Image: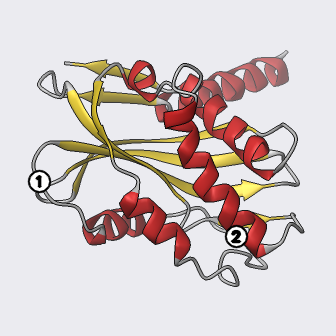
Amino acid sequence: MLRKITLLIVCLCYITAQAADSRIVLPAEVDDVTFYGVDFSLVNIIGDDATDQQYLQAFRRINELFVTEPEKYNIAKCIKSNISEYDFEVVNALNDAIDMAQARPLHSNMLSDEELAAHIAQIPVAGDGVGLIIVADNLNKTQEKGYFHFIFFDQATRTIVAKAFLKGKARGFGLRNHWARAILNSMKSLRVTHR
């Protein structure tokens, strides 16, 4: 009996921890957001033998889905804020410059808070207001899951305002559709509130 109670407590703690990671609380004044798309420049690709060129092409095409299929990839609805601008120039430049040899490590670790803060601080953006970027962490073909950081940041100071670490089940035919589904599924698990 004690074993069952212990197992129940562990499961509840795990569920609570998972739910906590999917929640973001934004200040009430954040109602317009510039969306920069999905940044794959720090990604680790695990267990997939698709070519580097196929991945680079898929990364660009995934970001295009937010514009070509806005009902399905409705980031504004997901974050409960207006998207004032879609600006994929920054992430397209970052994604085009990926060293694919580094993107396929023998052993993979998730990105730390420090690595994410340093990355956001170096993103070449200008202006005021809040930006949103989705930083891809791991695309794990073995697990059929993608892991992503949804990061809201102050565009003037490039400091992180709020973030969530989410995972999404990958599926679909073709590289783009397969990993775009993981992003979509992670978007569906995001819970944003304004206070």
Q: Give the amino acid type for the residue marked by disc 1 in the picture.
A: Gly
Which image quadrant for residue 186?
top right
Q: Which residue is drawn at 34% across and 49% down?
A: 87
Marks 2 and 1 close (CB-CB < 8 Å): no
From the top left corner, tell me how far across and down residue 191 is, in percent: 45, 22
Image quadrant containing the C terminus: top left
Q: Residue 80 location, x and y as percent?
A: 34, 19
Residue 155 picture location, percent across and down: 18, 53
Measure the alpha-carbon separation of dots 2 and 1: 35 Å
Please give the residue where the numbered disc 2 appears in the rendered image: 108
Q: Tell me the quarter of the image containing the N terminus.
A: top right
Residue 182 placement: quadrant: top right
Q: Is residue 167 visible?
A: yes
* Mark 2 surroundings: few (<14), some (14-19) or many (≥20) residues within 10 A: some
- The structure residue drawn at horizontal position 12% and vertical position 59%, both measured from the top left corner, is 157
Q: Residues within 10 Å of mark 1 (few under 14, many from 20)?
A: few
Give the residue drawn at x 56%, y 55%. 136
Residue 127, label in figure: 1
